[in-house]
Image (cartoon, rainbow, N blue to C red):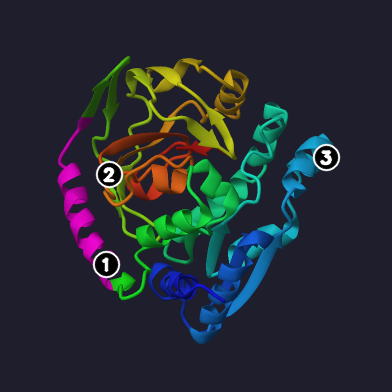
Amino acid sequence: MSDPRVAKLADLLVNYSVELQPGQLVRIDASTVAAPLVTEVYRHALRAGAHPRTRIEVEGLDVIAVGEASDQQLAFVSELDRVEVEQLDAIMTIWGDRNTRALTQADPDRVSRRIASRRELNKRFWERIDAGEATWVGTRFPTEAHAQDAEMSLPEYEDYVYAACHVRNQEDPVVHWREVSVELNARARELETFRELRIVGPDTDLTVSVEGRSWLAADGKLNMPDGEIFTSPVETETEGDIRFSFPAIFYGRAVDDVRLRFEGGRVVAAEAKTAGDYLQSLLDMDEGSRILGEVAFGLNYEIDRFTRDILFDEKIGGTLHLALGSSFKKLGGENDSGLHWD
């Protein structure tokens, strides 16, 4: 029996998040485990009059690529992908994994090179988004693997995910996210009056300049669930030390107890309790990977626990997070990188 919340989430993604219009070309990116949500998104995209197509990845191909591809194959980008980036009106990404730790033992340098190979494509699509030519949204399909990471049963985790998206029975998710949008936009305008943030905590005293930068209210248009306010800091003016209390997770691999020191806007020293080699490989990905691309406040107080999933964890009410790497040009950011690590 199908879960009615899946269809309700699909409707929200199609008609609120990306607002698909008749005749638009939309690609749905997902893995096979997310098939129930892919099916409903496809159905609702057709009902909206759009032209949907799917890109379904078989789980484990990324592990094979990192382990067996030549250097040339690892960096290869198809001309078909370059054409699509210019033609698509929307991309809807559904994250779902059968194994969230599949790349844990992979060579960190090869993982970094594979991520970096997509840099120009991602940059170009974000340029089109900022210009109002395209839209994108990312969401999570709950699986056993993610439930285990969150230390929940699958039914408990499903309840958690769909509650955070506000697609439970008797809820009107569009009304909810429109109300959230009004509140977050008001707070974003307040933050635009500030020139500098100082972050103080255990082993932390960090100064971040945000003068002249715009703030964006994350209200369900780019992520679902959502609930944060973010900007891109001034690239040359981050100074001091920070220690992160939650593990930093990237492509399924956790780096625990990360400590960074910034001088002149760049990370000049970094250490971690675990996966220090992975941390260093990401910092060395390219010229922009040691610079902050984002500073953000999590303001979704219905997301109240750490689940090892950045889609949710970055929005935990009352938290602050930073991202190394690429910045948001729409907000005044100037940093380019193949990395964006929250």
Circle count = 3
From the image, give the main secondary structure of the stretch colored magenta: helix
Marks 2 and 3, the one that precedes in the sequence: 3
Whether the residues at callouts 2 and 3 have beta carbons within 8 Å, the answer is: no
- Magenta residues, as a range? 175-196
Report the front residue among 302 and 154: 154
User: Mark 1 highlights which residue?
Assistant: 176
Mark 2 is on which residue type? Gly
**Mark found first going from the N terminus, 3 or 1:** 3
- Image quarter in which the N terminus is found: bottom right
Task: Relative to 82, say whether 241 is above or below.
Answer: above
Camera-side residue of 160 and 64? 160
Q: Is residue 331 visible?
A: yes
User: Any magenta on residue 173?
Assistant: no
Is there CB contact under 8 Å for labels 1 and 2? Answer: no
Identify the residue position indicated by label 2 in the image.
317
Q: Is residue 130 visible?
A: no
Q: Residue at x 72, y 28 (%)?
A: 107
Q: Crowdedness of circle 3 by 10 Å Cα count: few (<14), some, many (20+)?
A: some
Q: Which residue is mark 3?
A: 69
Crowding at mark 1 (Cα within 10 Å: few <14, some 14-19, many 20+): some
Q: Looking at the image, which residue is at 52% across and 55% down?
A: 154
Q: Amino acid at mark 3?
A: Ala
* Marks 1 and 2, the one that precedes in the sequence: 1
